[in-house]
Amino acid sequence: MAEPTYPVAARVADSVQRHFARHIEAARHAHAEVVCDAPSTATIAAIIDAAFWASLRREEGHTPKISLAILPPAAARHCARLAARLPLTPAGLAKVAPAVERPGIHLGVWHDGDSYYVWGTTRDVPAFCLVVEVVASGLVVVKHRTEAFGKFVNVAVLEGDHIKIVDEGVGRIVPDCPGIVTSLAGAIDQRSASGVTTVLIQLAASMRQHGRGGALLVVPAASDAWQESMVMPILYRVDPPYSELADLMRMSQADPDDLKRAVDAIAGLTAVDGATILNDRYDLLAFGAKIARRRGSTPIEQVNITEPVEGSTAVSATPAQLGGTRHLSAAQFVHDQRDAMALVASQDGRFTIFKWSNREQLVHAHRVDALLL
């Protein structure tokens, strides 16, 4: 390939390379099995460049959606090798994109000196393998899988000339930062995420995927106080509580496919107008519930908004600036029920986690859509 012509590729390559080097060193220090070495800045820039220009092409009227995993064929499992290498060019990537659009399939990419090529496809990539995914036209995400849980960790999100580098140190900066946010950000000390955090991440990703928007309220199992913030009666109350996800979470080794089906079933309910309610043991209590301000409670007047990307600063906002009714009602619910958490997906792809901050003494809105792409 020629020198990168997408300027952003060269601008982010150093930051991405340092992220991989830091995480791989930490994993090896912890005696984890890591087969990948940190990619060079030249490799990172070249792969991003090819992915970006491929995203702007059309193949039979469709935008290519591809995932490039940078690893030699010998390091891949469940792979199909091509008899002849394909040069890593935007036109070549767009041509093969229809074959690898389904989730979980990656094009394997490697290099011979300064020459990069596609060697085939793989369904399994090792931890800390550089993955560059084309999500939409002009939208490229740099990510990797961790050794602890299945959700890929986003390192950088590039949209045209707009760059978002994920800040893995968000837990040290943002007061009372929830574990789901630090785990999504890929913090080194959060790699061994709990099962609870992992299933919340899966729920968030599935909620965002259905594209209809939705709200999920996670309430304490030991209290019914959340009902004080509901319009009664709740039309779609579940009695007795539906416990499939809770039962799977109690298993020491639950089948991943069973867990995914249970997660998708609950996330699908969030598409119904109103909020889906889950307790912290993962029993489904209701869906389509209407949120109301608790009697005697004051209207929420202010929230702090943060996004876990480098250079981002906290913004103080009124509830009206958060978004629509779904965001306002979720913020009010957390304001009234301070031991609860609300996950809110917008139809446009934005995703916000509302949590009460004891240190700030107000509701904190964590914008995490860049972490769920």
Image (cartoon, rainbow, N blue to C red):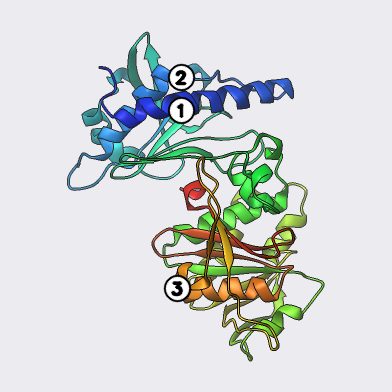
> In the displayed image of the protein, which residue is found farthest to the bottom?
233
N-term mark: 1 or 3: 1
Say if mark 2 contacts mark 1, CB within 8 Å: yes
Q: Secondary structure at mark 1?
A: strand
Residue at figure coordinates x 37%, y 24% from the top left: 45
Q: Is residue 363 visible?
A: yes
User: Residue 197: percent from the left, percent from the top?
Assistant: 68, 51
Residue at figure coordinates x 28%, y 45% from the top left: 137
Label 1 sits on what residue type? Cys
User: Which residue occupies the foreground of this view, 167 or 61?
Assistant: 167
Q: Residues under labels 2 and 3: Cα distance?
A: 48 Å
Q: What's the mark number on residue 93? A: none
Residue position marked by numbered label 1 in the rendering: 79
Q: Secondary structure at mark 2?
A: helix
Tell me where residue 350 sits by quadrant: bottom left
Tell me where residue 189 sits by quadrant: top right
Pointer 1: residues within 10 angstroms few (<14), some, or many (20+)?
A: many
